[in-house]
Structure formats: C-alpha cells, structure tokens
Amino acid sequence: MALFPKSGSVREAALVFDNNDPYDRSAPIRMVVPALIKSREYMQSIRNFVVPEDSVGVWYLGQNGFILRGGAGPLIAIDPYLSNSCAITFAHLPFRLDRQLPVFIAPEDLEIDVFVTTHSHQDHADPETIRRVGKTGTTQFVGPFDSMRIYRDNGVPESCCRLIHPGESIDLGGSTTLTATFALPTDDTDLNHTGTLLEFANGVRFYNTGDTAYAERLGALLPKNVDVCAICINGGFHNLAPMQAAQIVKAISPRVVVPCHYDMMVNNTGSPDAFRVSLELAGSEAAFNLMPYYKPWLYRRN
C-alpha cells in the first residue's frame, strides 16, 4: 500500500483539539485550523483532482465527514456536517456543541454524486446541510430508515432517496458499490445506525464505522478484508473509546486505520495519540494514518 501524503507530520501532530472550554459560552471558539481555502475553490479542487485508476482519493471534512472517489468513479460524501447547527439546536444544554473546525465546503457549494448518511444524528444527517445543498435530481441520497425522513423533510425529491439496510448492497455507478454494515445504536433516538463499506472498481475497499457503541461480539459482525477502516474514537455519547476502537481494528484487520469523530465538537473531542497507543497495546498491525485537512490522501495497494 502507499500513503500520500505521509501521515503523522509535524504540522498534523501539532494540532490541538482540547483548547476550548465547552462550559464557557462567553469565550470565542479557538479553531483547530484556520480556513485556508474558499469553499467553492476547495470543492472545485476536489472535483478537478485526477485520481489514478489504481487508487482511491479521500478528503476529510472532520467529525465523520469524508469525500471519496475511486479513479473516474462517482464522487461520494459520507456524513458531511457543513454547518454549526448543533450549537443552535442544543443551545439549551449546559455545554456547547460549537464546531472548532472551519466549514470546509458550504452546503451550496457541495457538488457530489452520492450523499450518504450513516444515521440520523444531527452531526451526521444535518438538516441544515441537507436543506441548503443543491438537489439537481442526479445526486443520490442514501441512508437508513430515519435518514429518509430527514431527506424528505428538507427537500430531497423522493426519486433521489435510496433506503438501505445493513447487509444490503447497491450499485453507485462507475463499478462502485456501497454496502450498509452493522452498527450498534448509541442511544434510543435512532435505532437504525449503519456503517458504510465502499468497494471501488479497482478493488479497494473503504469501510467507515459510523457511530457505534461497543459490544463483545461487535468485531465479529463487521466487514473483514478491508483496505481502509475509518473508525470513531471519541468515546463520548457511547461511541467507541480508543481502546475499544483498537480492539475492533485488531478483530477486523484492515491494512490502514484512520481515526475520526474526535476533532469537531468542543464538548466531544478525542485523542488520536491515545488511539495510536491503544492500537499498539491491542497488537494491531494496521498502519495508522492521521488524515490531513484541506489535502487529498491517496490510497493504493502495492
């Protein structure tokens, strides 16, 4: 396998995710990274990026947000949270849910072929993002049962909505398939959590866990023989904690593991370093890749 750019660089390692006090509403939010590229310019750079036929290009949007393309296949977004709506919706709580990453791409500028949500929590199926995103009639909106309600309530035409159940696979075009995978709900507000397994024309398999709680049997229910596993590590709100996530990675044996869901919300951060140590303690042989912001990561098998 080849990893481009090299992960764990000094710039990436120096990022700090716990600079904001979630209980101090008077303090300005200190951003983890500044806004480096204008929204439309960044989106166009993604659309224009030429992904080699033997590779998969991945762009990280923070939290559980990814954009992916294999070769000349469709451009796919997973759980794009492109607003600060959680801070507004949950302003009554004693802690803040403000984002501490820029909105990398404004919803109006998002130009993709497939919009995937793993479940209906607002930082995954964001009503504001879905309401504002362009709906040309060609974009597929894919997700489990409760995501369908959010799509329809926010203007997605019925013809563009595609319900998918765990274990079900659908053809996305360009010899790319999506399979919904098992995930364990983290609370009773949505009992239809899924993960996302993408298999590209070149055979590369990318698996995203979505939000999932831990159970002893979980590893036995998840996909094996994947090239890349993007896994939640924050531990808050019943998600996988670093050692739990490491045990899952050990069980499913991906070639590369990408931590996610640790960087966006000021009240719900996690430590990629703790996860990396946990991988070593668990005896995982997966290569660790800390995703950069604003830059594509190319994965290809050797």
Image (cartoon, helix red, strand yellow):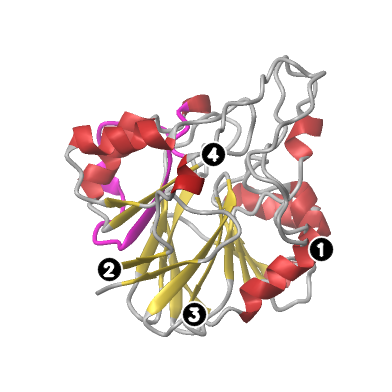
Quadrant housing residue 294: bottom right
Task: Determine the secondary structure under disc 1.
Answer: helix
Looking at this view, is 189 or 125 the one in front?
125
Left or right of 105? Residue 142 is left
Q: Residue at x 53, y 29 (%)?
A: 187
Q: Is residue 224 magenta?
A: yes
Residue wearing tag 4: 15
Q: Is residue 53 left or right of residue 280?
A: right
The disc placed on residue 1 is: 2
In the image, residue 7 sits, relative to residue 241, either above or below, namely: below
Please rate how many residues cluster around mark 3, counting C-alpha atoms within 10 Å: few if below 14, some from 14 to 19, many from 20.
Answer: many
Residue type at tag 2: Met
Q: Are marks 4 and 1 in contact (CB under 8 Å)?
A: no
Dot 1 corresponds to which residue?
108
Residue type at mark 1 is Glu
**Quadrant showing the C terminus:** bottom left
Tell me the amino acid under the disc marked 3: Val
The residue identified by callout 3 is 51
| Residue span colored magenta | 212-235
